[in-house]
Image (tube, grey):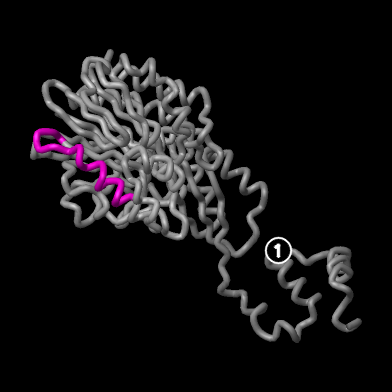
Amino acid sequence: MRLLHTGDWHLGKQLEGVSRIEEQEKFLEDFKLIIEEEAIDVVMIAGDVYDTFNPSSKAETLFYQTLKDISNNGKRLIVVIPGNHDNPNRLVAASPLAREHGIIMVDSLNRVLETGTYGQHQLIQSGPGFIEVEINGEKAVILTVPYPSEKRLEEAYLEVGLEEVEQLEKYNDKIRQLFETLKVHFREDTINVVMSHLFAMGAEETGSERSIQLGGSYIIDSSCFPKEADYIALGHIHKPMVLPNTNKRIRYSGSPLQYNKKERHFQKGCYIIDAKVGNIEITFTPFKVYKPIEVWQTDSIEHAIELCEVHQNEESYVYLEIQTDRYIQEYEIKSMKRLKRDILEITPIIDLKDQEIFQSNITEEPIESIFKKYYLRERQTEPTEEITSLLLEILGGTDEAD
């Protein structure tokens, strides 16, 4: 059985107000090709399908059309769980229609799916927090644990038989007990998998995830996951990674695109799991970068404008950091943005090496003199008497008057 682990698509996400939907469309077209070329049997989407609780109609259309295409008329099984960005009810609204295409959507821990045919495969057993499926004569048990907030955990306690879990105070202990209860569904004759969306200790936040933990209370220890699992497919962290000291079983697939400038340094991709009972092999398949995020650090305003001119025809998002000892004029900013249309942010890095005139004896120097020095530095011209008088009037007069 060949499984593919992905997640954190964040369909509809913007970068500094700029839509990424065109890049997401390109990614999903290439994603379909990967699935076909790799002959994937099961696609696991580990949450954060959308970027908001109320995604645009375009984002929803893109998601459902992609599921329909990769299911290949039910020949391929797809399992979807919500993340902390998703509205669970909205995400699974199309479940009745999705079933015939082999698409299984689990919106909550206490969801019990109807057994039977899903596309061209069988859902043999189902209960709160787990499903058992048969694909091409092989069986797999998948623990399906959507983003488990405190509220959602409380709603699921009794459903999964955790009458005593309410006595546990720590979130970590509740999650541990949850998996202890669910792992009884694993068997020696099945491929055993966990799907969830949460933050596990040892994972590295990369900047664009909206934190789902408060004061560390939502961070769980990797030992909470059942040792009996052959593979644990997680969502939430945007960097593909293996949790340390877990025998490479526990992994985050990461997001498909660079969603933050901190994500520009690592390769995006997905994991493909070639699984047999008692044995798995895992490979990483990289994704293309359609429009990279870049940070340009320049030593002058003139250098920044020159870079914009040289790279004006390249497809990239740019954060521009300019080392400068003066105010960046409006016409200079317009010039940069005219040359390089996808500048997202221009940040002046002020050189403070010659600011000592403001550091010593500042209380002994008249405020009028300090203001004139400052104005001259920033505007390269002396302030008019009118501006100086206005400042002194606001401050309550000159030092001599005091």
Residue pointed to by mark 1:
380
Which residue in the rendered view is the most extreme toward the right? 401
Task: Name which quarter of the figure residue 83 lies in.
Answer: top left
Magenta stretch contains residue 185? yes
Q: Is residue 256 visible?
A: no
Say which element carries label 1.
loop
Q: Which residues are magenta?
A: 175-191
Q: Residue at x 15, y 35 (%)?
A: 191
Magenta stretch contains residue 194? no
Number of marks drawn: 1
In the image shown, does 153 or 6 lie closer to the viewer? 153
In the image shown, does 370 or 80 lie closer to the viewer? 80
Sort mark 1 into few (<14), some (14-19) or many (20+) by Cα contacts within 10 Å: few
Q: Residue at x 27, y 48 (%)?
A: 241
Residue 179 on image: x %, y %: 27, 46
Task: Name which quarter of the figure residue 337 lies in.
Answer: top right
Residue 398 on image: x %, y %: 87, 78
Residue 249 on image: x %, y %: 19, 46
Residue 295 falls left or right of residue 17: left
Give the main secondary structure of the magenta stretch: helix
Q: Is residue 133 visible?
A: yes
Residue 374 falls left or right of residue 282: right
Q: Residue at x 21, y 48 (%)?
A: 226
Which residue in the rendered view is the most extreme toward the front? 163
In the image shown, does 89 or 281 lie closer to the viewer? 89
Q: Quadrant of the C terminus?
A: bottom right
